[in-house]
Amino acid sequence: MALLKPAESRLFLTPLTGFLLLFLGFPALVNLVYSVSSVSFETLRSPVLTGFGNYTLVLSDGEFWRSVSFSGRFAIVTALAECLIGLFLAIFLAPLLKKHSGLMAPLMLPLMVAPAMIGLMYRLVLHEFAGPLPYYLFLWFGDSPAFLDVNNAFKTLAVVEILQWTPFAFLLFYMAYSGISPDIREAAALDGAPWYRVLVWIDLPLMRPTIAIAFFIRFIDGFRVFDNVYALTGSGAGGATTSLSIYIYQAFFKQAAIGKAVAASVLLFLASLAVLTLINKLAAGRRRA
Amino acid sequence: MRMTSTLLALAGLILSTSALTGLAEAKVTVLGWPGGSEETALRATAEAYNAQPGLAEGDKVELIFFNRDGFFDKLQADMAAGSDAFDVNLVATYSIGRYAPYMDTIDLGPEAAKTYGDAVLKTMQFEGKQYGVPTDLSLHFMYYRKDLIDALMKDDAAKAKYAEISEKFLGKKLEPKDPDSWTWDDWAATALYFSKQVNPASPTRYGTVLQMKNLLFNMMVFQSLPRSYGADWMDKEGKITVDSPAYRTGLELYKKLYDAGASPKDSLSYEYAETNAAFGAGQAATALQWNAAAGDLTSAEKSPAVAEVTAMVAPPAGPKGRADHIHGLGLGLNKAAKNKEGATKFLKWLATENAALTYAKAGGSPALSPEVVAKIAADRPDLVKLGDFAGKYGYVMTGATSAKALSVYELQAKEFTGYWSGQQSLDEALKKTETGMADLLKK
């Protein structure tokens, strides 16, 4: 027997639906209207519908594609590195963490810091005259590289992102790894399978859905990166570190091109939606399995 | 009877709510420039205003601040949305045109002209109308290490090395000079001489610290170099003139110094704070930096390595003389203000001599008229220099108070840093800047 009648369920869901409609649906609707309108800060309340000109403007803007390229490369590199390192740590540290679960807390610490703070922290850490890293490099080697110049900025930003978010991937992988029944590994060991065969033929296939989900979540997060990049390099020399989010921010606030910014954000929303749908399908596949 | 009681209770509730709301609205809320000397000075000045005998409770001032990062963007979004969360808001010379549609003009009375002088009041005007009280003036000083320059000028061997370096990099033999009579070439030669990469015997790692991050404020610092060679944004007919020999000279000189290692390798990510850190660490011989840094760089507590040996002059001269970029901060009246009467009263008081002196004593940087600044010269000698440089060398580029002025600086920052970092040629950078500026500044 069902605990609630359908009418009661609807009644209980009404506040949540109302909340979502108001705080997510309304801004989304306004965004859609602005994206096909001519609008400025002076005419925020009276946009004039002009068709799909803003989308054409965005899609024909070389800077937009440059920012998509930056975000895409950044997302792939960081998501891959975070997943690989996270996977290695999860498997390598599993026996230790099983005995001392308290070690998990310090490993999770980077996740608790706001990305903007991480950006500011590294701005200090990497500063030639105030930061500890260049200080020791000068002390030991007599020189320190330009961490944030146009040749190294991408690498530095990627490392900063990886250092902060690898624990997230690690956490997911450790949970998935711990969830695999020890009986299966025991049976394989009895059959004489070496550790790498257990890893390749038992652990990784069982962890595959988690790996895919972790990769896509980190990919989305990397693709829409803003805070730590903005705090460290801004949009970079000549716009070299302009992520898609920074492109949207600049179009909106710096150029007051509201229609163009909103059109770009709608495109980002659609791309994120596509990735999220893929994740949902993967998760559904895992449930069926 | 019960109905009557309920109605009375309701009426009472409504009346008390209105009265409370009225009281809450009666305060004058001021949105100031957060952090730094401006906030400290405004807090002290507001305290002095609130302590005046006879000031009505509803006219007292309350201050609010939000973060500096993206301040002007957030302010624009708030004002465009008709926010009445503040009655008085911050305004800057280069953003008056952007905020004017959401602000009311204000008549500051005759005393304001005596306190500040007409030239300074103009930094808060748009299309001939006054939009604010000019609380702080920002311009740039050339900071230099007096001990190093003095030693250089006394040492013949050093002079010969200096001449050799200047000939190699600048194509002419130069002699060390007193910084107050420097041309930009003299400064460049000094910067090269004091860089380890050029001159391994240099006592400092770098000869200067260039602020080259893709940031609009860095363009304000850079602007005085081409200006002293005669640069302007547009001519009288409104034609954009950024693709000029003056801008080329300035841009090339920055790149030459950066490429030669006269400025830190990470200069392309440097702004105000990084420059202070580099100069304050004693590893840079010169720095073109905002006047606001004078306090920190000459404070034995904050910059123990250089405080005693740091001196300041106006930026070096070009063929058209010296030029110093003026950037004013002030406070004006929000069009959507809830307490306009109280806000106007506060702004008029703020423009008086006593208020300006209170603000200056508390650490602010108002550009005061010579008669007024004389009264505070003993406490704040830097303000004398500020007023002096602003009067002699201060300039505003043609078109630089328009609604899109900040966007022009943004555009220049992106294109010029693209050139300095070697991602595009000088021709490409100037062409893109010219096209973008024509679009932004078209009538």
Image (tube, rainbow, N blue to C red):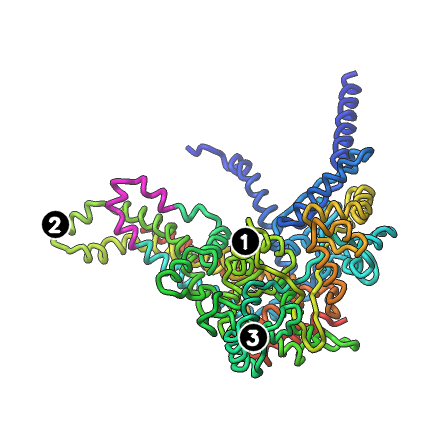
Which residue is painted at 67% across and 73% down in the image? B317
Horizontal relation, residue B386 to residue A179: left or right: right
Start and end of the magenta stretch? A88-108
Give the residue furthest to the right: B110
Give the residue type that dot 2 points to: Leu
- The dot on residue B35 is none
Could you say where residue A262 lies in the image, as x and y percent from the top left? 61, 60
User: Pointer 1 indicates a residue of which chain?
Assistant: B
Q: Secondary structure at mark 2?
A: helix
Relative vertical location of residue B283 with respect to residue B234 in this rendering, above or below: above
Residue indicated by mark 3? B189
Disc 2 to disc 1, C-alpha distance: 69 Å
- Disc 3: which chain? B
- Amino acid type of the residue that numbered disc 3 sits on in the rendered structure: Ala
Looking at the picture, does residue A97 appear above or below residue A4?
below
- For label 1, the residue is B303
- SS at badge 3: helix
Q: Position of residue A17 (x, y in %)?
A: 56, 43
Residue A253 vertical position relative to residue B13 in the rendered view, above or below: below
Looking at the rendered structure, whether the residues under marks 3 and 2 are on a common chain is answered as no
Q: Main secondary structure of the magenta part?
A: helix
Label 2 Cα neighbours within 10 Å, binned few <14 / some 14-19 / many ≥20: few
Which quadrant of the view contains residue B19? top right
Residue nearest the viewer, comparing B160 with B91: B160
| Residue B22 on image: x %, y % | 78, 34
Please name the residue that numbered disc 2 is placed on.
A190
